[in-house]
Image (spheres, rainbow, N blue to C red):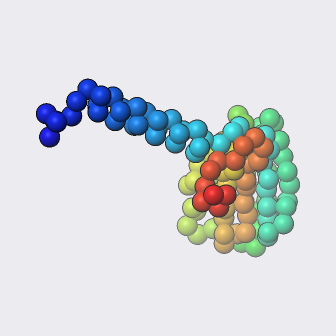
Amino acid sequence: MLQHIKPGDFLTLMIGAIGTVWVTMIVWSGGAADTALIRSGGKIFRVVPLSRDQQIEVPGPLGTSIITIEKRKARITSDPSPRQYCVRQGWLQQAGEIAICLPNEVSVELTGGQKKYDSLNY
């Protein structure tokens, strides 16, 4: 099979592969986030800038969730939910990223800049 591929074919395949990687990086990378939008019980609890390191206690039906903002990133560091999915999500740093603790009805979403591409805004 390789004996049938000519230098022009190989060049076309390489340009296509590089173009695909480049487009993927451009489309799926969000811009830098400016603020964190914190919700509790479906309502906005607080909007905080990412420029100041802080810990925020957010009340929910199961107890208090702790959101940490550090070095222009945010994460949920503690939550009373049983499976801890939102805590395991880790640091959020690009606009449009979100961590949701469903049992405790607490979420943190990064806003500002340009949101990442996903199926919801397709």
Q: What is the quadrant of residue 41 in the picture? A: bottom right
In the picture, measured across the screen, residue 87 lies left or right of residue 52, that is left
At 65% from the left and 61% from the top, the residue drawn is: 120
At 46% from the left and 40% from the top, the residue drawn is: 20
Rendering coords of residue 29 (x, y %): 60, 41
At 63% from the left and 68% from the top, the residue drawn is: 81
Rendering coords of residue 98 (x, y %): 67, 55
In the picture, measured across the screen, residue 107 lies left or right of residue 8, that is right
100 in relation to 94, above or below: below
Rendering coords of residue 94 (x, y %): 67, 43
Q: Quadrant of the C terminus?
A: bottom right
Q: Quadrant of the N terminus?
A: top left
Depth check: 37 or 26 in front? Answer: 26
Rendering coords of residue 118 (x, y %): 61, 55
Depth check: 38 or 21 in front? Answer: 21
* Direction top: furthest residue: 7
* Residue 74 in view here: no
At 73% from the left and 48% from the top, the residue drawn is: 110
Q: What is the quadrant of residue 18 in the picture? A: top left
| Number of numbered labels in the structure image | 0
25 in relation to 83, above or below: above
In the picture, measured across the screen, residue 91 lies left or right of residue 14, that is right
* Residue 90 in view here: yes
Depth check: 112 or 49 in front? Answer: 112
